[in-house]
């Protein structure tokens, strides 16, 4: 029994005692909470204040303004209270550290993901031809918006193998970003064709620099004073 009829409730009184409530129920749109009738939303706690972009949200059945649960759509992962593009080979890394799959006017692309397992990314600088003797210094001093010298390095032979394995996807991303493609695909050399030499960070015991002919994926080595292409890489 209750002392008085709650707000937003319908009450029945005793036939022989009109001052006392015999039974009561909440009006439509309200639920009991103790001796009161309240909006059901008052009893619900939203897991997030609003539905993020690229997400699917489920709302409480009795409170359509509050989110009960949410999940990111296919191709996106949760990051805090947002859904961000899932990293994949060919995804872009922007200068603010975020990852996406689009060329955006308000973001600067600084790298492309080569391999998600090793978290390897390569720079968009893929057509720099220098002597092997200069490659290490070039890579270690390489910078972009959002990165500093020392955060990049020259690729190992294994890194070059990963680049070769995913060359087609990486070239698509480079082309979409308006950058030259790997292996001179936009400028076929009349002598070397499209089987260009790419330097690694590794040396032989005889002072030659290990390299890959990226057209065929052939691993070899050359005199360190010869010219070759160098791609700075980093872990993201």
Image (cartoon, rainbow, N blue to C red):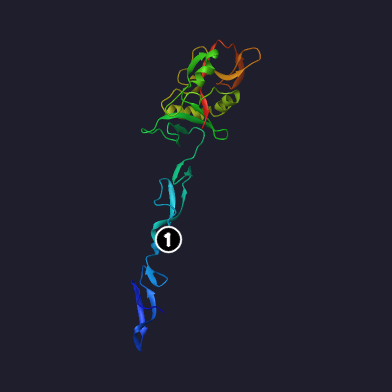
Name the residue furthest bottom. 16
Q: Nearer the viewer, residue 50 or 174?
A: 50
Residue reaching furthest front? 3
Can you say whether 218 is above or below 100 in the image?
A: above
State the image coordinates of residue 193 (x, y, percent, origin top left).
51, 16
Residue lying furthest right: 205
Give the residue displayed 40% in from the left and 80% down from the top.
23
* The image quarter in which residue 102 lies: top left
The count of marks equals 1
Q: Quadrant of the N terminus?
A: bottom left
Which quadrant of the view contains residue 197? top right
Q: Position of residue 55 (x, y in %)?
A: 44, 48
Instruction: Write down the quadrant of residue 132 in the picture.
Output: top right
* Residue 196 seen in the current view: no
Q: Nearer the viewer, residue 157 or 134?
A: 134
Q: Which residue: 44% across, 54% down?
A: 47
* Residue 70 locus on image (x, y percent): 46, 52
Label 1 residue SS: loop
Tell which of 215 and 173 is nearer to you.
173
57 up-or-down from 184: above or below: below
**Rendered location of residue 31, percent (x, y):** 40, 69
The residue that mark 1 highlights is 44
Q: Is residue 65 visible?
A: yes
């Amino acid at each position: 029994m209750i002392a008085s009829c709650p707000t937003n409730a319908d009450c029945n009184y005793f036939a022989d005692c009109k001052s006392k409530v015999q039974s009561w129920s909440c009006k439509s749109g309200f639920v009991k909470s103790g001796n009161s009738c309240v909006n059901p939303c008052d009893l619900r706690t939203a897991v997030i204040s609003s539905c993020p972009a690229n997400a699917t949200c489920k709302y409480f059945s009795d409170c359509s303004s509050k989110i009960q649960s949410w999940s990111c759509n296919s191709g996106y992962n949760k990051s805090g209270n947002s859904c961000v593009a899932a990293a994949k080979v060919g995804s872009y890394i922007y200068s603010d550290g975020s990852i996406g799959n689009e060329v955006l006017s308000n973001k600067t692309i600084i790298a492309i993901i080569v391999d998600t397992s090793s978290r390897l990314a390569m720079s968009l600088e893929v057509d720099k031809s220098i002597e092997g003797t200069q490659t290490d210094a070039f890579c270690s001093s390489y910078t972009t918006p959002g990165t500093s010298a020392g955060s990049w390095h020259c690729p190992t032979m294994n890194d070059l193998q990963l680049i070769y394995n995913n060359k087609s996807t990486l070239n698509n991303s480079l082309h979409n970003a308006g950058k030259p493609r790997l292996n001179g695909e936009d400028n076929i050399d009349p002598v070397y064709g499209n089987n260009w030499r790419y330097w690694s960070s590794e040396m032989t015991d005889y002072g030659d620099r290990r390299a890959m002919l990226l057209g065929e994926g052939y691993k070899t080595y050359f005199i360190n004073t010869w010219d070759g292409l160098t791609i700075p890489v980093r872990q993201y």
